[in-house]
Image (tube, rainbow, N blue to C red):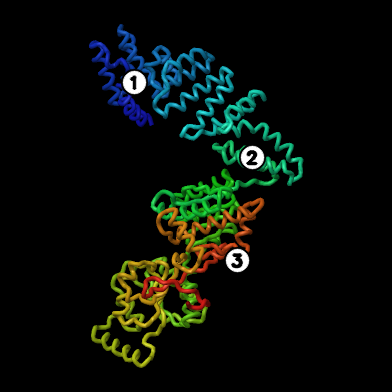
Amino acid sequence: MMLGRGIALVALLLVLLPAAWPGGARAQDGAAEPLAAVRQLVATGQIDAAQSQLRQLLLESTEDVVRQEAMTLLADLLWQQQLPEQALAYARRLSPAALSPDLWQALVAEQISLGQLDAAQQLLDSRPVPANAASVPERLRLQLRLAQARGQQLQALMLYSQLIQLPAPADEELWHELETLVRQLPAAERAEAEFMFAGTGLEPLLQLPDLREQVRQARQLAADAPERRTLTHQLSQLLAAAIAPALRQQLVTLLDQLNGTPWQRRAIGVLLPLTGRYAPFGQMVRQGMELAAAQAGADAAELLFRDSAADPARAVDELRQLVEQERVLAVLGPLSSEAAQACAPLADQLQVPLLSLSHWPDLPAQGAYVFRHSLTSRQQVETLLDYSFGRLGLTRYAILQPDNSSGERFARLFAEAVRRRGGQVHSWQRYAEQATDFRPQLLALRDLPAGLDAGSLAVADREQHNRRQQGLPTLGFEALFLPDYAEQIALLAPQLVYYGIEGVQLLGIHGWRSEQLQQQAGPYVAGALFCDGFCADGARPAAQRFVRDYQARYGEPPTLLEAQGYDCARLLLQLVRQCEAPTPALLREELLRPDPLRYQEMVSGLSGFAADGEAQVQLCLLRFGNRGIEPLPPAGVPLP
């Protein structure tokens, strides 16, 4: 540990020596050699030897310049070695200009503590206001201590007001000191201070003594008395303007006492990855939410954005602060799966609704206060099969999936849903995640051996062609489900035709929504169906208005993420406005209450929430048609 501190001292002193030793450049020639030797000792980490030589110089040298330089360096060495009493003993004998900033501040503080206030003031005045912004708070604190020692309370308040306006956040100790000072102010001086600091960060704190008395008196009135409503509004406004957690907690306590129940701020927290690798997606969601807030008007609840950075631990900390310090009514987000999974149990513990945008499987099962609006695998599978069973009458299916967690989840849900509807899964094949050759799997779908030679394959193709000419079934399935993304489907689709898998309905997932896929494999995916959560060119008037408004605000078209963020923010802002006295518990009840009118203007298909907190969504069904990607009506709706 001593070695580490010695290395740090060497590094610091190598930087400070030329600057912190004002007389060094002016030393007479006779002192140059011993001072150079001291510098060499410091540079090599021989601090004790350097101190010994400096003390020897002080005893032997008769030159004032050399003695001043030696004393300055010795004081700095002792201070850096955390020997303040010895360092200050030398500092008192030096001119203020020769002192390092740390020693100068320590000497001022010492004089204030000893009651030598005039000397402290002279020492403060001996150095100009620093140009370095980092030194300003320490100087203000010294001036503050001096004003308090002199009993200049209004001057102290002025200095406090300067401190709390600095870019660096004020610490809790500072606010507790300030609160103590306000309590000690005589009524006349406090009234004068309220006038002086109206509209500043000090105003709420100066009003606290009167507010406590007003709350005490208002609690004796009826719950619906106008005086109580007025006082609640006043406290809420002050809370919105308060910048310190300690002050906010004081105001929240008064609101709790006034209303007799835990008070909530008229605000909604938002947890999104605004930095890190997921920041682009977080920003997309944020823009959708900000559009909803802008349309909601100035009197709507505020959205408090916090950065989860897609880090579970940070997301949990931000969630706790939003609920326990900001006292929000609900929280939107997180977006990333890991952050959402970490936050869900805490939200349920804190009993605040968490409306996440993550697709993490079974996320709402984490608690009664956990909700989720995201494009899930189950929603896509159910939408596809509702159409293929209900509209197309298809009952025999095959599955060709990538061998990864996403492909496995989609395929399992699809097979379960087919069997639940009374259908049949004829074949279920898997291929490597980055595969480019799908021959074994495609032959298996046709019930042909993987090692089939070219001649035998040609014979099988002729037999298949003949059956097709006779109107007979050529494959054991009518539809093929391919739960992979556009890049892989562009490679796979042509091979389907090459290996004779034709005349079947192709079913895909939201990852098929790609103009590039149609350009690369257009003829091979013609007529293929897939679904998505947002259809910008669909028939919903609300979606069309959303696209127009979003483009006007941001200069680009929205995607599903912006649409989901817009709907979630719009819904919660609407619920807060409709509730006369919103609470987290009341918002949870409202989210679960069926109300078709509430969701008419939603743009991402959101139509409510099931009892388990999962969003009920009407997805967009899409088809690769002659004019590109075309929206289709869901099952049960007549074709245009």
Q: Position of residue 598 (x, y in %)?
A: 59, 62
Q: In this view, does 39 lie above or below 268?
A: above
Q: Nearer the viewer, mark 2 or mark 1?
A: 2
Question: Which element is circle 1 on?
Answer: helix
Q: In this view, does 156 lie above or below 303?
A: above
Of residue 474 and residue 556, the one placed in the foreground of this image is 556
Q: Of the residues under marks 3 and 2, which one precedes in the sequence?
A: 2
Asked whether residue 467 appears in the rendered view, the answer is yes
Q: Nearer the viewer, mark 1 or mark 3?
A: 3
User: Looking at the rendered structure, which numbered label has been put on residue 596?
Assistant: 3
Question: Residue at position x 49%, y 20% from top?
Answer: 109
Distance of mark 1 from mark 3, alpha carbons?
Answer: 74 Å
Q: What type is the residue that disc 1 sits on?
A: Ala
Q: What type is the residue that disc 2 sits on?
A: Leu
Dot 2: within a 10 Å radius of its alpha carbon, few (fewer than 14), some, or many (20 or more) residues?
many
Label 1 close to label 3 by CB (< 8 Å): no
Q: Where is residue 182 in the image (x, y as percent from the top left)?
A: 62, 27
- Judging by the rendered image, the residue that carries numbered circle 1 is 20
Q: What type is the residue that disc 3 sits on?
A: Pro
- Judging by the rendered image, the residue that carries numbered circle 2 is 235
Distance of mark 3 from mark 2, alpha carbons?
Answer: 36 Å
Distance of mark 2 from mark 1, alpha carbons?
Answer: 51 Å
Dot 3: within a 10 Å radius of its alpha carbon, few (fewer than 14), some, or many (20 or more) residues?
few
Q: Where is residue 330 in the image (x, y as percent from the top left)?
A: 57, 52
Q: In the rendered image, which quarter contains the N terminus?
A: top left
Q: In this view, does 496 lie above or below 85?
A: below
